[in-house]
Image: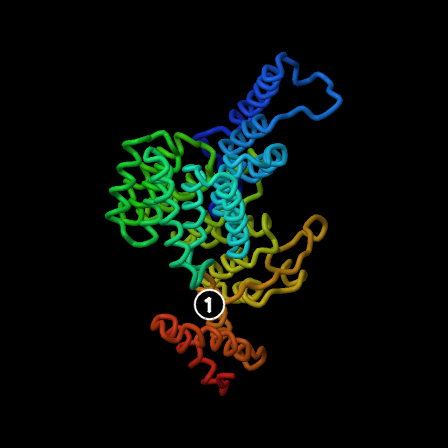
Amino acid sequence: MNLNGKNLTFRNQKAKSNPNRVLILLALLILGAFILQGQEQGKIVSPFAPTPIPTRSASSFKMEADAHFYSGDLNKAIQVYQSAIAIDPENADLYAELARIQTYSSSLLTTDVQKKARLQEALATINKAVELDDTSSKAHGIRAFVLDWNSNPVFAGEERATLLAEAFNESKIATDLDNRNTLALAYYAEILVDEQNLTAAALNIKQALEQDDTLMDVHRINGLILESQGEYGKAIDAYEKAVAITPNLTFLYIQIGVNYRQLRQYDIALSYFDKAAKINEQLKIQDPIPYLAIGKTYSQTGDFFAASLNMKKALNFDPTNPDVFASVGITYFKSRNYEGAIPALKCAVRGCTAEESCEVRACDSTSDVMLPVTGVALTDNTTVYYYTYGSVLAGMHRPTNGYCEEAMKVLKEVDDVYAADPIIHDIVAASQEICFSYNYAIP
C-alpha cells in the first residue's frame, strides 16, 4: 500500500507474488525435513509425535532457512541458519550461505551504522567458512561478494582499495578451484563494476549467464551492470528475471522501481515500491524502505503532501532512525515547509529528545512510544542533511529566534570537510551570506 495525498485511503494494487504461498511451502519443507530425518534414522516418524529430546537436524534447519529467504524474510532466514550452525558448527557451507544472506540483508537496513555492522557480521561469518574449508570454491566465491559489499566507500574509507583487491583475489581463488562456479564469476563482474570497469564486467556476466541463467544473483548483477551503463529498460528486464526466480525479495522490487523512476515512469515505479510494501505487510515486517522510496517518488513529481505522508509512515516504523528524519526534513524543505523541515533535520543532524521527536512524528500520546534520536556523523552520505539544515536555519533566521548561530556552526562543519567541492562550497557560502547580513560571524 502507498499513501496517496490525493486520496487519504490505502490504495490497493494487485501484487505480483504472494508470500503466503511461500509460507505454505515453508511448512511443507519443514514437514519433509522431519520425514527425511526419520529416514536417516531408519524409520519415518510423524513431526507431531512427542519426543523426549529435540530431534531436528542441521539439514532441516537449512531447508527452513532457505524457505524463509525465498519468502523474503531475510532476518528469519539468518536466525534459522544460526540454529543450523549451532547443531553442525564445522559445516563450512552453512557459514557460507549465512554470510550471503547477511550481506543481502544489509540492503534492507536504513542507516550506515546498521549496514556496516551487518556487513561486518557477514565478513566474520564467511571468514569462518574459509577457515573451516580453505578448498571450498563456494566459500571463496561468497567471500569475494562479502568483501566487495564491505568495500563501499561510505563503510570502508581508506580501506576500500584493499578490500576490493582482496575481493578480486578471492574470486580468482574460487574460479581456480572450480571453473564452473557461476556465482564466483558473477561476483567478479560485480567487483569490476565497483572498479568502474563496465566493459569487462559485461563480458563476465555474459559468460555467467551462459553457464547458468537460473541464479537470482546472476540476473541481479546483470541488472546492476546495465543500470550502471544507463540502460535502464534493459536493467529492468534483468531485475525482472531475478524476481521470477525469487519473487519475494523486496530489494529487487525497489531496484526495479528506481529504474522506472530514472525513466520518469513514476506510476510504474510507485507500483513496484508498493509491491515491496505489500510483501513486508504480509510477512509482518515493518520495513521503512518502500515508504521512503514512495515518498521520494512523490517528492519528484511535486506531490509533497503524499510524499510527507509516506515519509511519516516510514518514520513510525523506525522512530529512532536519523536517516528517516532527514528524509522527512528534506521533503519538507523541497515543499517549502521550512518550519516543518527544521525540527526533522535537527533530529537527523544533532539528535533530539523524545518530546522533540514526537513533534515531528505527530505522536499519538495514547499509543506511540516516545523515543530520543541520536544524530548522524558528517559523511559523504549525510552531507546533504547538514547543508540543508544549515541553509534552512539561515533562511528562516529572525532576530527573535537566533537561528543563524546554529546555522553558522553547521555550515562551518560542512565547509571544513568539503570546501574543495565547488557545489557544496557555493551552497554553504550562499547560506553564510544570509547570516553575515545579520552580523553573524563564522565561529
Residue extending farthest to the bottom is: 439
Q: What element carries label 1?
A: helix
Residue 43, located in which quarter of the rendered image?
top right
Which residue occupies the foreground of this view, 351 or 202? 202
Residue extending farthest to the top is: 43
**Which residue is the site of mark 1?**
388
Which residue occupies the foreground of this view, 78 or 95? 95
Q: Can residue 275 be seen in this view?
A: yes
x, y percentage for residue 158? 42, 64
Local crowd at mark 1 within 10 Å, few (<14), some, or many (≥20)? Answer: many
Which residue occupies the foreground of this view, 218 or 181? 181
166 is higher (above) or lower (below) than 334: above
253 is higher (above) or lower (below) than 333: above
Residue drawn 49% across and 72% down?
390
Residue drawn 57% across and 55% down?
321
Residue drawn 44% across and 52% down?
296
Q: Can residue 273 be seen in this view?
A: no
Left or right for 200, reference 424: left
Identity of the amino acid at label 1? Thr
Total count of labels: 1
x, y percentage for residue 208? 30, 36
Residue 83, located in which quarter of the rendered image?
top right
x, y percentage for residue 409? 52, 77
Asked which colour scheme the image uses, the reply is: rainbow
